[in-house]
Image (cartoon, rainbow, N blue to C red):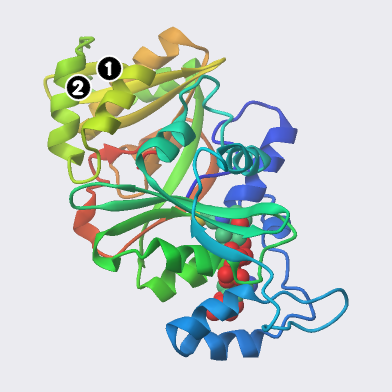
Amino acid sequence: MRYMVRYDDGDPAPRARRSLARGGSGRAAACSPLPADRDRGGARAAQRGSADAQRSHALGRPPEGGRVNRALPHHSVGHADLPRESAEIRALAEAYDLLASWPRRPDYLDHLLDTGRVEVARTAAGVIGYGGVFVGPHQTHLTDLFVRAGETGQGAGGAILAALELDRARTTTFASADPRAHALYHRLGLQELDQLSYLGATANDVERLRRQIDPIASPAEADTEGAIRRHRELRGGLHGASTLSFLAKTARPLTWPSGYAWLRIARDRVCVGPVGSDDDTTAVSVVAAALLEAVRLRPRVQIVVAHSHPAHALVVTSGFTTNDVDTFMAGDRSLVDLTRYCPDPDLG
Ligand SMILES: CC(C)(COP(=O)(O)OP(=O)(O)OC[C@H]1O[C@@H](n2cnc3c(N)ncnc32)[C@H](O)[C@@H]1OP(=O)(O)O)[C@@H](O)C(=O)NCCC(=O)NCCS
């Protein structure tokens, strides 16, 4: 899942915060060692036992200076109680700097809380973690799994994931570099299938890309119906009517004969994506055309490109900055074709 800062904005503070969330350059803090007093062997044994034992693993927390006492539950896990808990979930998302590229409401978190499935871990003090999925007709995308710093490594993330009751064969996620996330997703049966780079670029970088590509898809049309139709053809397995109308509300559509793109303006930058093309031979020119349109709107752009996408090598040689890399994990490779699709990092 997302991220550290997904762009190169020269502001180390948000980058450091976001890298905490997404296991980027601040991963040491995000992936801090388990508390020395955690009985990990006991946790493993519980996990391999019955479903009840699995949950009890999630409930123990070491009392101050002591060992885990699994008879004394620390947190419980269940459906988010909305709208009552939405402010606490939003506070957690903000603490992980997940909303920086969504300066306006509704943002992806509003959309997730409105239309997705969200499970939370709570203590007496409130929500300490949440996980959220977008559920489509053929695919379920785990977009968020976050546990409050200081509460990680004690079973909450695993318990939230269990409560989401994901079907391995339908599930996709963009995993951060946090080894705890990988451990949990492997246990669910997901495989590491690709890498996704979070790239930032200036108008000069995009111009260098344009010079490498001939022909470039042009001119673009601002065609909402066309972009919706093409996006539904490519991503209808995940994105139903509510996400299509959310895209139309929050981003500008562009279409070309061989593809489409959505551009979302976020303060001084444009977030480019989703971008889709008919096939991998047109994928590069559609991506380049979308980026050229984007730098007309703002001086900086950001885009997520899979390493299997033919544009990836070209954007790197054009000078784009890789701000973070996630791992595309899924139960089935055919759920999304990243050779001709650049996702939105939050919507999938
Ligand atoms: C990733 C995250 C949600 C997991 O939640 P959590 O409550 O810390 O995880 P849990 O304690 O339930 O489980 C962690 C698992 O990772 C394992 N683990 C811990 N450190 C590990 C390491 N260095 N290498 C491999 N596995 C490790 C644990 O053994 C545990 O597995 P087990 O239950 O079989 O023993 C949480 O750590 C977090 O919020 N991290 C920062 C944000 C982030 O990167 N989120 C993921 C987005 S994809």
Asked if marks 2 and 1 touch (Cβ < 8 Å), the reply is yes
Give coordinates of residue 249: x percent, y percent.
34, 18
Q: Quadrant of residue 33?
A: bottom right
Choose between 342 and 136: the one closer to the eye.
136
| First along the sequence among labels 2 and 1 | 2
Quadrant containing ligand 1: bottom right
Choose between 180 and 325: the one closer to the eye.
180
Tag 2, which secondary structure?
helix
Give coordinates of residue 268: x percent, y percent.
56, 15
Kindly identify which numbered label has been placed on residue 253: 1
Identity of the residue drawn at 50% across and 50% down? 80
Q: Quadrant of residue 216?
A: top left
Q: Taking 13 as reference, is 214 left or right? A: left
Identity of the residue drawn at 21% across and 15% down? 224
Residue at which label 2 appears: 227
Say if disc 1 is inside 8 Å of ligand 1: no
Identity of the residue drawn at 38% across and 40% down? 305
CA gap, disc 2 and disc 1:
6 Å
Residue 239 visible in the snapshot:
yes
Say if disc 2 is inside 8 Å of ligand 1: no
Kindly identify which numbered label has been placed on residue 315: none
User: In what quadrant of the picture does the C terminus appear?
Assistant: top left
Identity of the residue drawn at 48% across and 82% down? 52
Residue 279 visible in the snapshot:
no
Give coordinates of residue 82: x percent, y percent.
49, 42
Q: Taking 94 as reference, is 326 left or right? A: left
Question: What count of labels does the image hold?
Answer: 2
Choose between 91 and 260: the one closer to the eye.
91
Classed neighbour count for the residue bearing mark 2: other residues with Cα under 10 Å, few (<14), some (14–19), many (≥20): many
Up-down relation of residue 31 to residue 106 (above or below):
below
Q: Amino acid at mark 2?
A: Ala
Up-down relation of residue 324 to residue 27 (above or below):
above
